[in-house]
Image: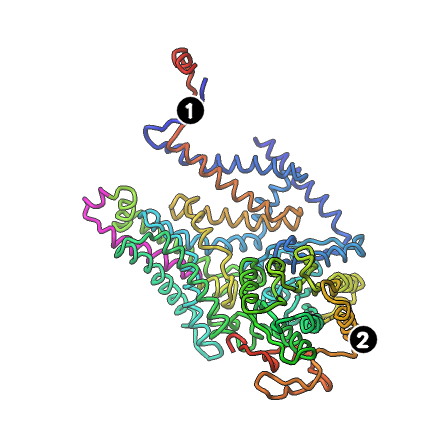
């Protein structure tokens, strides 16, 4: 008897739907074993991770706050990835968006500027992110440069630019030389939705982006073109779709959303521009995009789920003294199982009884 | 399936109840750490302080810490999580937690907060820090004595007053030994990045420095100095094992006594917001053993330390001449006052460099 992995004739739609659930199930089993080894009660540990954060309004808000940038960036990335354009630099576009929007906040600081400031900041953030994303896109279309490399390298450029600005020209004059701008004025701050919490308008904007993304990809000709260019480039060429134009478009959309996420984060939860505004959102969003199968609704669910693991992990650190590293192990195991289970969409396991002829030949 | 679920819920509730009961009668104290507790520098020392406090008050106190909390958007949530979990006193141990600490403190007026190295306070937010410049002065004396090239190498993190006052204290001390002493400064713009710190140390040695000092947290510079056969000072913690023949001394941050004092005050109900800035006398700074130097230098270092503890020597004794040749206003009578040191944004005479961004 022999266990082999063989290619399916066509993708299994049942498995495609069930595989994330299998992955989560396997993750929970593995984590239970891990908790037991650490000497913690697995049921209460999993309860702290997954149930407790869902039971009070504070934690739910925090999950939404954490998921907001991840989902917004991931939706943009899904456009790129569907079109086979590999934007790895969302982190940089996030930072540039934050910088461009903050420019207005810094310039209007202390003046009696009106309520137009915040919308203008969001717009600037989106434009900045889009223009920044167009650099690797143009290099690819014009010179054939690998967008994976150029977009990734531009992350470091953005990081250093932000660094320079908050240490030099934009530094808070009353901040004792610490690398940060002054706190933004109220008109330059994203409003809080629920008094006493941290849920902000950005979460609503993200939901709108999810809907817009779903409509654009699912119901419009442009969305169809994007998917065809990615899935069947030759067919797209015969169809007369301009793949270069689509690369520019998807990069611009992706950059705009990442940039908007950046300025929302700075003008919302952070409140000022400083180095380290992103704990790697642009990279984590890549995981979110794929966990959500490049589908806007899937991305929303994946983003919320990943946020849940962050919040739950923190509560587990507090309530059960479970180390931070376990949260990271947990996220790694989850990804591993998702990828492993996904292989079952295209492949299947089969038991083959080894025939005597073959075994004698091998001997 | 339903039964399993029911059993799971019951177990969950039971676990929750038993957990709640055991923790109810102890005072809960929380800590937010910037790095991992194993960083051998800044966070490590804070955690030693926590453990020292527990050693004395462990029967009345329960602590919780969150490590590796970045100074970005996550820190406010982490602080609030500790407050929500019932911690009554919360130490936030890095400058970047200043605004988040103040924001959370407004929402939880009954929780007390202690923010390390910040300058904004509130009714329920204290600040605390060490007079690191005192240790720097002793290092300056030693460096002035042992340097053969007359060039010191200084690795700066950020050009904030704490770091600038450290450079000035070093130079004022070294100038009392060798009036022509020079200092080369490299800003690495990070508190902890062993690669950058090592590169900076190499560059400084290439520029002729034979004594390396740092205001960053890793032992990388010490290791480079050891390889090149130069001398160096440790930072934050004892780094002698990274340079047994290299480390002259190290300014060690000793937070234990302060944490013990403040937790005691919380237990007694006498906690009030303060701005505490302690030095060698209160043992918030402790100098590592003076090694790898001649006996007369060691003696001089010990005398300097004793004089600072006794209050007979102030590192910023007037008159002080700034880099531009003008005398600095002496607001503290015989020496600069604390406000001038906490906001220090000028170099003293003899430093030929420029403060970045100034």
The residue under the point 33% across, 60% down is: A135
Lateral position of residue A122 relative to residue B102, left or right? left
Kindly indicate whether the residue at mark 2 contacts the one at mark 1 (C-beta within 8 angstroms): no
Image position of A193 with respect to A346: above or below: below
* Residue A233, quarter of the rendered image: top left
Q: Nearer the viewer, mark 1 or mark 2?
A: 2
Q: Mark 1: few, some, or many residues within 10 Å (few <14, many ≥20)?
A: few
* Residue B43 image position (x, y, % from top left): 65, 58
- Is residue A158 or residue B195 the one in the foreground? B195
Image position of A283 with respect to B113: above or below: above
Q: Is residue B46 visible?
A: no
The residue where tag 2 is placed is B310
Which residue extends farthest front?
Answer: B148
Q: Mark 2: few, some, or many residues within 10 Å (few <14, many ≥20)?
A: few
Dot 1 lies on which element?
strand
- Is residue B155 or residue A246 the one in the foreground? B155
* Residue B312 image position (x, y, % from top left): 79, 79
The residue under the point 58% across, 78% down is: B351
The residue where tag 1 is placed is A4
Magenta-drawn stretch contains A261:
yes
Question: What stretch of residues is rendered in magenta?
Answer: A234-262
Judging from the image, mark 1 belongs to the subunit labelled A
Distance (Cα) linking label 1 and label 2: 80 Å
Q: Is residue B142 visible?
A: yes
Q: Main secondary structure of the magenta part?
A: helix
- Tell me whether marks 1 and 2 sit on the same chain: no
- Is residue A264 or residue B66 the one in the foreground? B66
Lateral position of residue B270 relative to residue A142, left or right? right
Lateral position of residue A206 relative to residue B60, left or right? left
Magenta-drawn stretch contains A235:
yes
């Amino acid at each position: 008897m022999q266990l082999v992995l063989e290619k399916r004739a066509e993708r299994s739609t049942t498995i495609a739907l069930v595989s994330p659930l299998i992955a989560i199930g396997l993750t929970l089993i593995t984590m239970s074993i891990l908790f037991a080894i650490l000497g913690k009660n697995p049921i209460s540990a999993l309860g702290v991770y997954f149930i407790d954060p869902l039971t009070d309004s504070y934690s739910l808000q925090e999950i939404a706050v954490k998921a907001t940038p991840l989902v917004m960036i991931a939706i943009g990335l899904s456009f790129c990835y569907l079109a086979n354009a590999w934007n790895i630099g969302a982190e940089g576009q996030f930072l540039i968006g934050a910088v461009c929007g903050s420019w207005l906040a810094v310039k209007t600081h202390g003046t009696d500027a009106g309520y137009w400031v915040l919308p203008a900041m969001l717009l600037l953030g989106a434009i900045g992110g889009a223009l920044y994303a167009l650099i690797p896109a143009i290099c690819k279309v014009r010179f054939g440069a690998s967008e994976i490399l150029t977009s990734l390298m531009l992350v470091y450029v953005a990081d250093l630019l932000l660094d320079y600005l908050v240490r030099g020209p934009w530094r808070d004059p009353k901040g004792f030389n610490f690398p940060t701008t002054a706190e933004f004025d109220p008109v330059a701050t994203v409003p809080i939705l629920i008094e006493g919490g941290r849920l902000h308008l950005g979460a609503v904007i993200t939901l709108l982006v999810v809907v817009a993304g779903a409509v654009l990809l699912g119901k419009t000709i442009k969305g169809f073109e994007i998917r065809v260019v990615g899935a069947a480039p030759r067919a797209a060429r015969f169809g007369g779709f301009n793949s270069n134009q689509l690369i520019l478009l998807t990069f611009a959309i992706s950059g705009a959303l990442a940039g908007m996420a950046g300025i929302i984060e700075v003008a919302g939860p952070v409140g000022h521009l400083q180095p380290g505004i992103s704990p790697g959102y642009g990279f984590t969003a890549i995981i979110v995009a794929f966990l959500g199968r490049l589908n806007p609704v899937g991305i929303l669910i994946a983003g919320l789920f990943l946020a849940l693991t962050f919040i739950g992990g923190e509560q587990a650190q507090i309530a059960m003294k479970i180390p931070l590293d376990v949260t990271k192990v947990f996220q790694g195991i989850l990804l591993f199982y998702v990828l492993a289970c996904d292989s079952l969409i295209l492949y299947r396991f089969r038991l083959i009884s080894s025939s005597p002829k073959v075994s004698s030949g091998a001997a | 399936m339903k039964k399993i679920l029911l059993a799971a819920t019951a177990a969950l509730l039971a676990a929750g109840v038993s957990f709640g009961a055991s923790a109810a009668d102890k005072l809960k104290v929380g800590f937010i750490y910037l790095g991992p507790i194993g960083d051998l520098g800044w966070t490590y020392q804070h955690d030693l302080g926590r453990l020292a406090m527990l050693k004395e008050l462990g029967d009345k106190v329960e602590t919780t810490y969150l490590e590796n909390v970045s100074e970005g958007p996550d820190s406010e949530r982490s602080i609030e999580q500790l407050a929500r979990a019932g911690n009554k006193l919360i130490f936030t141990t890095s400058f970047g937690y200043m605004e988040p600490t103040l924001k959370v403190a407004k929402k939880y007026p009954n929780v007390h907060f202690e923010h390390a190295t910040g300058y904004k306070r509130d009714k329920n937010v204290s600040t605390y820090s060490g007079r690191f410049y005192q240790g720097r002065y002793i290092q300056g004396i030693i460096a002035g004595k042992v340097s053969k090239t007359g060039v010191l190498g200084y690795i700066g993190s950020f050009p904030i007053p704490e770091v600038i006052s450290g450079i000035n204290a070093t130079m004022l001390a070294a100038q009392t030994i060798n009036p022509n002493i020079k200092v080369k400064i490299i800003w690495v713009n990070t508190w902890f990045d062993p690669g950058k710190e090592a590169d900076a140390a190499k560059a400084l040695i290439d520029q002729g420095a034979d004594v390396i000092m740092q205001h960053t947290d890793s032992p990388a510079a010490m290791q480079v100095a050891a390889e090149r056969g130069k001398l160096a000072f440790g930072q934050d913690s004892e780094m002698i094992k990274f340079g047994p023949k290299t480390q002259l001394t190290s300014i060690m941050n000793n937070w234990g006594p302060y944490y013990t004092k403040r937790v005691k005050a919380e237990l007694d109900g006498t906690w009030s917001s303060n701005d505490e800035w302690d030095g060698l006398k209160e043992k918030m700074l402790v100098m590592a053993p003076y090694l790898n130097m001649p006996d007369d230098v060691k003696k001089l270092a010990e005398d300097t330390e004793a004089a600072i503890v006794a209050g007979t020597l102030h590192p910023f004794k007037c008159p002080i001449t700034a880099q531009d040749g003008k005398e600095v206003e002496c607001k503290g009578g015989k020496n600069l006052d604390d406000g001038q040191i906490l906001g220090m944004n000028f170099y003293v005479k003899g430093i030929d460099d420029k403060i970045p961004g100034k």
